[in-house]
Every structure is written in structure tokens, then in C-alpha cells.
Amino acid sequence: MTELLAIETSSEACSVALHCEGGVRVFFKHAPMGHAELLLPAIRSLLSESGRKLESPDAIAFGRGPGSFTSLRIGIGVVQGLAWGAGLPVVPISSLAAVAQDAADSSDSGFPAVCVATDARMQEVYTANYNLGEDGIVMLSGEERVCEPAAVSAPAPGPFIAAGNGFERFPELEALASQAAVCMPQLQPRAETVCRLALDWLSRNEALPAHMAQPVYVRNDVAKKPGQG
């Protein structure tokens, strides 16, 4: 059975999960600016509680973003260091997909699509649309992008879930939220969901070498403000 350590730091929450022996141990704390202090102790605690060493998992899965530049750098720096030190491969998972998967799992009605919008600062959002596969795993429809809130678009016609904190932080998204069958603005990417998506990814792919643990920012210029060329 595949064992995974998962790390997710793309949002204001610090999240770690250890998938082993058919179960998942989880650390999750909403702690803006607290990732650097919380991450390594949380990893050590989960490994210790389960009687595992850092070398025990088969791979380290991580939320690759998009998300907060600072917290992503912290998390992926830790992933790289741990993977190099323990000789473990890595599995990159979209942080937006983790939100979409949680939304799909949280809905009892099996809505076929999810629209994710998360706060990207600078009056923009990270957004992507997902369809729910027959196996219950979300699949990206189109591309991940960063845009003004008013430019977020709904999935193809039909019922959908709106998910992510963009739907509670930007008035421009109220109309789209009202069109959704369900709106879940409270959802943040979580490491246990990264684990689930990583296990699905590994069913079709090989884990990657440690040096390929890289963030996906989507926004190319951190310093650029909306309207600047």
C-alpha cells in the first residue's frame, strides 16, 4: 500500500497529512504568516504519532499552487529539502484542484462541475473550472488562470458548485455565486485532499525526482499591479 506525506501551504492555512496503513493523520491550522514556524514540527509530530521515519513514505505530495507566493516558497522549500535528504520522489498537485475535490466530496448531490476562485491579492483571483469524473475525481476543464473577479466564468451550462474564498471576498463574484447550486467559500486546500489526488495521479504516473518540486504561480510578475503593462 502506498504511503504518502503531503504538504499544502498555498493558502492562509498550514496543512500536513500522512497517509499510511489505510488511514490519514492530519494537521490543519489557519495561521496566516505562520507556515515557517508550524510546518516542520507538524511533520515531525505526524511521523512520530504513526511510528514512521521521514524515509518511510513512498513519496512526498505537495500543493504546487497557485497561491500565496511567500507560503508556497516556504512549503516547497521544505518539500525539496526533505525529499533530497530522505531520497524520496515528489508528486505535485494543483491547489485549486484540491479545493475543487473537497467541494465535490462535500456535496451529496453529485453536481458535475466546480468553479474555484481563490483570493490572489492585488484585486485578482486564481480560478479554474473542473468536471467530476466517473471515479469521483475532479478533472481540469480549460486552464488555471489569474484574473479580475469579474472575469471569472462559470463551467459549461448546468448545475455547478462555487468554491473558494474569492466568493466571499469579492462583491463582483456575488452574481456568479448566486447562479451556483451550492456556494462553499470556506473551503481551503487541504493536505489530506492533496493525498487523495496524489494517489490517483500515481495510479497513472511515476513520482518525480526531488528537483522537480517547483511552485506554479500562474501570475508571472509578483510586483505587477492590475492595469500595468
Image (cartoon, rainbow, N blue to C red):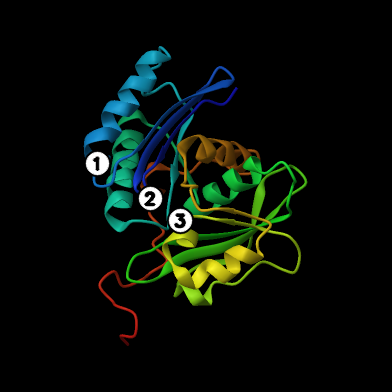
Q: Which residue is drawn at 67% across and 44% down?
A: 107
Give above or below for 183 relative to 123: above
Q: Are marks 3 and 1 in contact (CB under 8 Å)?
A: no
Per the model, the C-alpha gap separating discs 3 and 1 is: 19 Å
Q: Circle 2: is it few (<14), some (14-19), or many (20+) Cα within 10 Å?
A: many
Q: Quadrant of residue 217?
A: bottom left
Local SS, label 2: loop
Q: Which of marks 3 and 1 is nearer the N terminus?
A: 1
Q: Hey, what amino acid is under mark 3?
A: Asn
Where residue 106 appears, as percent x and y from the top left, is 63, 41
Q: Residue at x 71, y 43 (%)?
A: 136
Q: Which circle, 1 or 2, is nearer the viewer?
A: 1
Q: Hey, what amino acid is under mark 1?
A: Gly
Q: Mark 3 points at which residue?
A: 165
Where residue 83 appears, as percent x and y from the top left, is 36, 35
Front residue (pair 8, 59): 8
Front residue (pair 223, 120): 120
Q: Which circle, 2 or 3, is nearer the viewer?
A: 3
Residue 34 - label: 1
Q: Hey, what amino acid is under mark 2?
A: Ser
Q: Quadrant of residue 222?
A: bottom left
Position of 157 with respect to 30 (left or right) is right
State the residue lying farthest toward the left.
37
Per the model, the C-alpha gap separating discs 1 and 2 is: 12 Å
Where residue 75 appears, as percent x and y from the top left, is 32, 44
Q: Which residue is drawn at 37% across and 50% down?
A: 11
Image quadrant where one finds the N terminus: top right
Q: Mark 2 points at which residue?
A: 10
Q: Residue at x 30, y 85 (%)?
A: 228
